[in-house]
Amino acid sequence: RKEVEQDPGPFNVPEGATVAFNCTYSNSASQSFFWYRQDCRKEPKLLMSVYSSGNEDGRFTAQLNRASQYISLLIRDSKLSDSATYLCVVLTSGTYKYIFGTGTRLKVLA
Amino acid sequence: DAGVIQSPRHEVTEMGQEVTLRCKPISGHNSLFWYRQTMMRGLELLIYFNNNVPIDDSGMPEDRFSAKMPNASFSTLKIQPSEPRDSAVYFCASSRSNEKLFFGSGTQLSVL
């Protein structure tokens, strides 16, 4: 079983739609969680950290469920510019090991 | 502020040749990571350093791969000899004490 798993998609949604991605992790000692965004042929860039109580940044909401070992990302009012691959990242307690999921591809359609 | 700087951006080489990828982390960051990305396997962690010391190289695929960090501002990833299956994008990333990870622009490696 992979340490971090994501549905690869693609998710094709119309502009203005709300879309949600989940990511599951296997190591219960995981301590920090992030969502990264990667555009085609570019490096991954931090979208947002994920806090235990959940957090919001504009149209983006991230949540953590430690009991079920998953994190989620919700995008409201999707824009064409949101089209990208969204990578879930998990950092295990006591290490410096950032483990990436394989990413979920989102395509927002006009 | 300068981000993580990688060179070269593109490298095309023939099978059997030595390849050296270079990385300059963000100043003040104490952890450095080398990742490889392919369509099939996604982003794989190859090796990471903390305070210039290699901590975990379990992701390095074979003895043909080696990495060094002689000082806080420079790291290399070397492949010798290179093989076609090494073709991928190699990313370097740095962070400060388990905070956010910042990536360089990557090196697109093609081994013919």
Image (spheres, coloured by chain):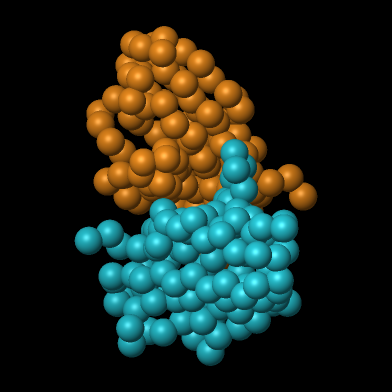
Q: Is residue B24 visible?
A: no
Please tell me which residue is depicted at 66% across the width and 49% down the height of the picture: B27
Residue B95's image quarter? bottom right
Depth order, front residue of A81/B16: A81
Q: Quadrant of the C terminus of chain B?
A: top left
The tint chain B carries is orange
The tint chain A carries is cyan
Residue B65's image quarter? top left
Q: Residue furthest left?
A: A1
Depth order, front residue of A86/A54: A86
Q: Residue A85 appears at what percent x and percent y?
A: 55, 54
Tally of marks: 0
Residue A5's image quarter? bottom left
Depth order, front residue of B48/B30: B48
From the viewer's perspective, is residue B102 above or below residue A7?
A: above
From the viewer's perspective, is residue B91 above or below residue A82?
A: above
Q: Residue B69 appears at what percent x and percent y?
A: 47, 38
Please tell me which residue is depicted at 34% across the width and 79% down the height of the picture: A69
Please tell me which residue is depicted at 71% across the width and 71% down the height of the picture: A16
Q: Residue B66 appears at what percent x and percent y?
A: 35, 31
Please tell me which residue is depicted at 41% across the width and 69% down the height of the picture: A23
Is B110 positioned to the left or the right of B101 in the image? left
Q: Residue B109 appears at what percent x and percent y?
A: 48, 25
